């Protein structure tokens, strides 16, 4: 008896054997797959069938999701400068690189357009949020996962022409937000930028920090809606963090394939309290974006909520 027949007969080990190669890609949709296995007719590959289930689940979620309320400013002792604008994408959260091992090395279809490392970057994930749900689904299926147009049309219960049209519009929307690629992970170029950033941040050296930023650097801090664009306004925001002698210690990690740091504020008692997680987006030899996440994300990266006084 083949695996499909055994799984339909209730053999959970056979079902696991069928779906395990795709588990890291699909996760929660597997329960839907188990419930709907009787509807699998074998015409499409198991991977295509599973992605159809996952795509429809995601589209339903996107269409029914309510706008999340932005959080009010709550960083004690810091009065921020006027933001460039108030952002709408306030739900964004970082993803530890340690959990990506094996997840970004899955086999892709021949038409994949984006590198897997690029497709999990914060810049890419953020840019996707401005796309309508159907364009978003088509872009991911075609350009990230590499499914053919006919496979994508079948998953979305639409025509190949509709898929091509949606993909064209999605690509146009995404290309406007792309920038020069970052240096390779772990390369001397990346290491140099990161080392200079740590030195500037920990010493509160605004001039050195500004020298690392691109002219159009972008800073955000979800779920706070405050966004700062441009070197001067970003420098003013950073300077506000260091007022009153506030000093930080940075602990390196990685998020979404990018350099990241747990930031710890030096208290009068000597204890250093975690204030958040900073993720850097590099472009060439500079920092094109910096995203601050709240301190509840620190344990996701194996980082403590606080550090003992120096010398302990």
Image (cartoon, grey):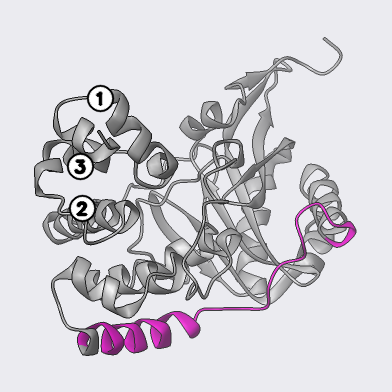
Closer to the camera: disc 1 or disc 3?
A: 1
Residue 198 numbered mark, or none: none
Q: Residue at x 51, y 63 (%)?
A: 119
Q: Secondary structure at mark 2?
A: helix
Q: Residues within 10 Å of mark 1 (few under 14, many from 20)?
A: few
- Viewed as shown, does residue 293 lie left or right of 250? left
- Viewed as shown, does residue 15 lie left or right of 82? left
The magenta segment: 162-189
Q: Is mark 3 in CB contact (under 8 Å) with mark 2?
A: yes
Residue that numbered label 1 is attached to: 12
Residue 95 lies, with reference to residue 56, above or below; the image says above
Residue that numbered label 3 is attached to: 33
Q: Residue at x 70, y 21 (%)?
A: 268
Closer to the camera: disc 2 or disc 1?
A: 1
- Viewed as shown, does residue 138 lie left or right of 108? left
Q: Is mark 1 in CB contact (under 8 Å) with mark 3?
A: no
Does residue 177 show up magenta in the picture?
yes
- The Cα–Cα distance between marks 2 and 1, rounded to whole angstroms, is 19 Å
Look at the image and tell me whether residue 214 can be seen. yes
């Amino acid at each position: 008896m083949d695996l499909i027949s055994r799984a339909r007969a209730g053999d959970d080990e056979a079902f696991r054997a069928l779906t395990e190669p795709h588990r890291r890609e699909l996760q929660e949709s597997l329960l839907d797959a188990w419930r709907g296995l009787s509807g699998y007719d074998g015409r499409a590959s198991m991977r295509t069938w599973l992605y159809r289930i996952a795509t429809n689940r995601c589209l339903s979620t996107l269409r029914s999701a309510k706008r999340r309320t932005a959080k009010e400013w709550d960083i004690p002792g810091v009065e921020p400068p006027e933001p460039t604008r108030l952002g709408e994408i306030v739900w964004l959260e970082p993803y530890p690189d340690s959990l990506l091992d094996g997840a970004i090395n899955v086999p892709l279809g021949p038409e994949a357009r984006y590198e897997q490392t690029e497709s999990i970057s914060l810049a890419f994930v953020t840019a996707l949020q401005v796309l309508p749900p159907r364009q978003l689904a088509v872009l991911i299926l075609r350009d990230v996962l590499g499914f053919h147009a006919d496979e994508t049309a079948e998953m979305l219960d639409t025509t190949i022409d509709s898929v091509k049209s949606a993909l064209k519009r999605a690509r146009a929307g995404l290309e406007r937000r792309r920038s020069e690629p970052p240096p390779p992970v772990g390369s001397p170029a990346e290491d140099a930028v990161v080392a200079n950033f740590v030195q500037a941040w920990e010493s509160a050296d605004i001039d050195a920090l500004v020298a690392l930023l691109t002219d159009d650097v972008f800073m955000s801090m979800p779920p706070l809606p405050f966004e700062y664009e441009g070197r001067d306004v970003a420098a003013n925001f950073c300077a506000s963090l260091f007022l009153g002698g506030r000093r930080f210690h940075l602990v390196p990690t990685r998020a979404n394939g990018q350099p990241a740091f747990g930031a710890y504020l030096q208290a009068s008692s000597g204890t250093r309290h975690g204030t958040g997680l900073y993720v850097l987006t590099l472009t060439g030899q500079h920092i094109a974006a910096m995203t601050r996440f709240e301190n509840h994300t620190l344990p996701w990266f194996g980082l403590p909520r606080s550090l003992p006084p120096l010398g302990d």
